Image (cartoon, helix red, strand yellow):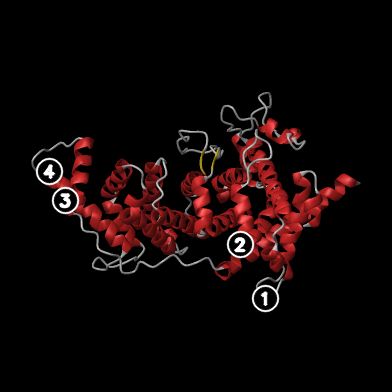
């Protein structure tokens, strides 16, 4: 940490920071580790600031490698300008005059991502888990240059590229999983969650693959809404028959904690909520389509997590949705998805029809409104979308959502529950650190 503190260039601090993470992870589940204790006791604000700056520029560098393969730079952004701040303009890669890569070339290069510098995320995870003061610095710290985004924005931006391409390799999946654990730790702390809702910044999210979420209405927005988009993108872009079950479980874990905080604090954020509902219910249909294959991968846990999040949104949406139309839209989409939800329940054996269970709550709401709409159709065959929305609003009065007996508070994060995955991440980080050290030696020769 002394070396980190003394480094003038943020990227020069990355390797010593990475080394502390590797040392902190050495047999950490089997024995007392003094480096982890040091993370918890650390209180030097100036060094923390240097660490956060180093993380920011490492994330910027890693993101630039994705952009160099396929430039999705929005109007007004400049990769070269960003990198030139630390003398890395040559790494910008994507220039107008550069020849376009073929799809095969892009695929091969994407498969090699993320860069070995991603190993620093392991240290970031340990520091975040152990030290709440560091979490505060990480989320709240402003950029040292007004022309550049803040550090937490840089982290979320890189994570979005990593998540869109997580399916490409086991290594990318492991690091994406690690970023989700970091977000779990941050979002379950009420003070940090509040900070993520109140702190606004521009966050560039990956737009390299369809479907693309709408751009935010304002350049600066709360970090919490950027995280919602990050999670929705992760759900939309990793749909495979060999589903990455751990990735999706942690995605819903972050989402559940974030929605839980919004509801408990009655924080109402302006956001394109309909896109989140669409992503969640499209995922229901995907799980149904490949139920036979996915059941063999243990995807019933994913299905349960998905149902729990949908039920959470349904039962507490009034507390955090800023406009009635956002809540109405959720009900409308549930009505459309009634058959799909029933199929999901049966395909993954989530519950019996008579059970008081989250999935039956969703099905009950869908059935309630479907019956209501049919009764109106008996009087008028064709109903306009406006008329259906009016029926949905009227239906609130006769809707009876039974309390869910199996509802339990979200369990606090326990690192031991992720022991196997974290050991795999540590092995990947060691391999990447070896690559970085070898590269440094070659440059020095």
Q: Which residue is mark 4?
A: 376
> Residue 59, percent across and down?
66, 45
Mark 2, Cα crowd under 10 Å, few <14 / some 14-19 / many 20+, is: many
Gap in angstroms between the C-alphas marked 3 and 4: 9 Å
Q: Quadrant of the N terminus?
A: bottom right
Residue at 56% from the left image edge and 45% from the top image edge: 160
The image's mark for residue 420 is none
Looking at the picture, tell me which residue is in the foreground, 389 or 363: 389
The image's mark for residue 30 is 1
Q: Residue 110's image quarter?
A: top right
Residue at 67% from the left image edge and 45% from the top image edge: 56
The image's mark for residue 129 is 2
The image's mark for residue 371 is 3
> Residue 302, percent across and down?
43, 60
Instruction: Choose the circle earlier in sequence order: 2 or 4.
Output: 2
Instruction: Choose the circle earlier in sequence order: 3 or 1.
Output: 1
Residues at marks 2 and 1 touching, judged by CB atoms closer than 8 Å: no
Residue at 28% from the left image edge and 61% from the top image edge: 360
Observer able to see residue 230:
no
Gap in angstroms between the C-alphas marked 3 and 1: 58 Å
């Amino acid at each position: 940490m002394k070396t980190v503190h003394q480094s003038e260039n943020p990227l020069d601090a990355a390797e010593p920071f990475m080394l502390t993470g590797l040392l902190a992870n050495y047999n950490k589940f089997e024995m007392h580790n003094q480096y982890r204790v040091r993370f918890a006791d650390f209180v030097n604000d100036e060094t923390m600031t240097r660490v956060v700056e180093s993380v920011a520029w490492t994330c910027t560098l890693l993101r630039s490698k994705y952009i160099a393969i396929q430039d999705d730079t929005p109007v007004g952004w400049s990769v070269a300008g960003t990198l030139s701040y630390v003398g890395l303009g040559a790494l910008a890669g994507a220039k107008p005059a550069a020849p376009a890569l073929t799809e095969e070339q892009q695929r091969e290069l994407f498969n090699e991502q993320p860069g070995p510098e991603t190993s620093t995320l392991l240290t970031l995870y340990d520091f975040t888990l152990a030290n709440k003061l560091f979490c505060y610095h990480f989320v709240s710290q402003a950029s040292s240059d007004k022309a550049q985004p803040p550090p937490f924005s840089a982290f979320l931006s890189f994570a979005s590229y990593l998540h869109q391409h997580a399916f490409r390799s086991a290594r990318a999946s492991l690091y994406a999983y690690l970023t989700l654990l970091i977000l779990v730790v941050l979002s379950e702390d009420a003070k940090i969650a509040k900070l993520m809702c109140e702190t606004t910044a521009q966050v560039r999210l990956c737009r390299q693959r369809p479907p693309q979420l709408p751009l935010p209405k304002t350049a600066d927005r709360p970090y919490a809404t950027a995280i919602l988009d990050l999670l929705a993108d992760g759900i939309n872009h990793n749909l495979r028959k060999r589903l990455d079950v751990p990735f999706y479980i942690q995605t819903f874990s972050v989402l559940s904690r974030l929605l839980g905080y919004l509801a408990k604090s009655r924080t109402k954020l302006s956001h394109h909520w309909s896109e989140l509902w669409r992503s969640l219910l499209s995922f229901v249909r995907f799980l149904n389509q490949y139920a036979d294959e996915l059941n063999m991968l243990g995807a019933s846990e994913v299905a349960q997590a998905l149902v729990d999040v949908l039920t959470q949104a349904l039962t507490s949406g009034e507390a955090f949705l800023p406009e009635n139309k956002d809540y109405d839209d959720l009900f409308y989409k549930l009505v459309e998805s009634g058959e799909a939800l029933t199929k999901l329940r049966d395909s993954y054996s989530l519950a019996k029809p008579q059970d008081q269970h989250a999935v039956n709550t969703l099905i009950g709401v869908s059935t309630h409104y479907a019956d209501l709409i049919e009764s109106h159709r008996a009087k008028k065959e064709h109903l306009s979308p406006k008329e259906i929305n009016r029926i949905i609003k009227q239906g609130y009065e006769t809707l009876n959502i039974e309390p869910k007996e199996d509802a339990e508070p979200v369990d606090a994060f326990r690192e031991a529950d992720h022991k196997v995955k974290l050991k795999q991440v540590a092995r990947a980080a060691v391999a990447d650190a070896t690559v970085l050290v070898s590269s440094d030696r070659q440059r020095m020769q």
